[in-house]
Amino acid sequence: MDTETIDTTVCVVGGGPAGLVLGLLLARRGVPVTVLEKHADFLRDFRGDTVHPSTLALLDEVGLGPAVAALPHGRRVRTLSATFDDGRYTVVDFGRLRHPHPYLLFLPQWDFLDLLADAAGRHPSFRLLRSTAVTDVTRDHSGRVTGVRAEGPAGEVTVRSRLTVACDGRTSTVRSALGLVPVEYGAPMDVLWFRIGRQSDDPVGLEARVAAGGLMLCIDRGDYYQCAYVIAKGGYDAVRAAGLEAFRGSIARRAPFLADRVAEVAAWEQVALLTVRVNRLRTWHVPGALLIGDAAHAMSPIGGVGINLAVQDAVATDRLLGPRLADGSFTDADLPAVARRRMLPTRLTQAVQVIAQRRVVDPLLHASGPINAPGVLRLFTRFPALRAIPARMVGVGARPEHTTPSH
């Protein structure tokens, strides 16, 4: 079978938030861009369903604010709380932010990605190839990356590009093909991911339950919760060995309001293991290729900021490289600017996550007996204005990015 060859200016590998945002922004400039997505659609259980205030502001800037607001399954949440053995405490209050969107939007990621893909598809320079899995990069005689090879529905595809951008996540195929190895900073936990039905009088938004042995997050998706059950790193085999009944019992202990429906978790096939990693590349580029998002820096689920960081990377990439890609003056010497811009917020965010993992999550995973709220949350109760600090860190982050006007 003949190989299909596609010529484009930018080849984006991965149709997640970073890849589609970058594709959309470049297409607005008229830059020919091809996005390769290995799946046929976006209907999968993603780890992140939160759209942060800074991302919502970016969507406003590209004219998608009304479309996002009209999506039927979005839920605006102004506060985030956690329930300990001694009560429920509000940890974050986005309503205290001076921001056009003082809330967190819980939105199924497939709806978010469909919206981005549809908006990008209205630009003639944008192309999305679904069911197309990248297998390797291509290089010229000097070793410079010149595109990728992939397997599509009709066979092999070669995409030739001026720039290849890897947005293909923490197990990046492009990163492996380039021989780049991130520095690992460790994580004491993994996450078990499953669904349980939600009733009309259940908590709305995000429900966090903290108890001896760990914590559990219940993400409101309307008629069901997507649950993240935190376990000690490498502890999945022990959880399975204890049996499904024991696992259901531990769910009920961590989240008593779900006790009447834990039987919905009827088989281990309904439970997915998510391996938590925190890592970062020292160098985000090689000649002809750039890595952003989780491909450059895998984030802990703490704070739910991974999507936000990836989108910010994409916006910075467009602003720094887009004009030169559009006028044909782009060279590999432009690539270091992206990491220079985005390394600081990445380092700061990961530093906070690693500290939280070591000082909060790890002790919880090995604790016994009642778990009461730490003193800082009692301080937040006494002085509610302090809740704006984590709201700023989670909702906006360090060095938020902004788009440039379309061309």
Image (cartoon, grey):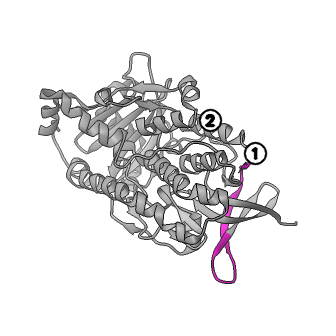
- Image coords of residue 228 (percent x, y): 40, 41
Category of crowding for the residue at label 1, using alpha-carbon neighbours closer than 10 angstroms: few (below 14), some (14–19), many (at least 20): few
Specify the amino acid type for callout 1: Pro
Q: Quadrant of the N terminus?
A: bottom right
Residue shown at 37% from the left, 66% from the top? 184
Residue 145 magenta: yes
What's the mark number on residue 310?
none
251 left or right of 322?
Answer: left
- The spot of residue 402 in percent (x, y) is 47, 44
Against 172, residue 37 (above or below) is above
Q: Is residue 55 magenta?
A: no
What residue does disc 1 label?
124
> Which residue shows up at 17% across the image and 32% down it?
380
Discs 2, 1 touching: Cβ within 8 Å: no
Q: Within 10 Å of the Cα at label 2, are there few (<14), some (14-19), or many (20+) other Cα atoms? A: some
Relative image position of residue 227 (x, y in whole percent): 42, 37
- Can residue 185 be spotted in the picture? yes
Residue 234: x, y in percent?
A: 37, 59
Give the mark toward the camera: 2 or 1: 1
Which of these two is toward me, 23 or 267? 23
Q: Secondary structure at mark 1?
A: loop
Q: Nearer the viewer, residue 304 or 83?
A: 304
The image quadrant that residue 145 belongs to is bottom right
Quadrant housing the C terminus? top right
- Tell me if residue 370 can be seen: no
Real-space Cα distance between discs 2 and 1? Answer: 17 Å
Q: Eyeballing the image, is 251 above or below 299?
A: above
Region of the chain picked out in magenta, as a range = 124-146
Where 120 sits versus 184, above or below? Answer: above
Examine the image and state in which quarter residue 261 appears. Answer: top left
Under tag 2, what secondary structure?
A: helix
Q: Which residue is mark 2?
A: 115
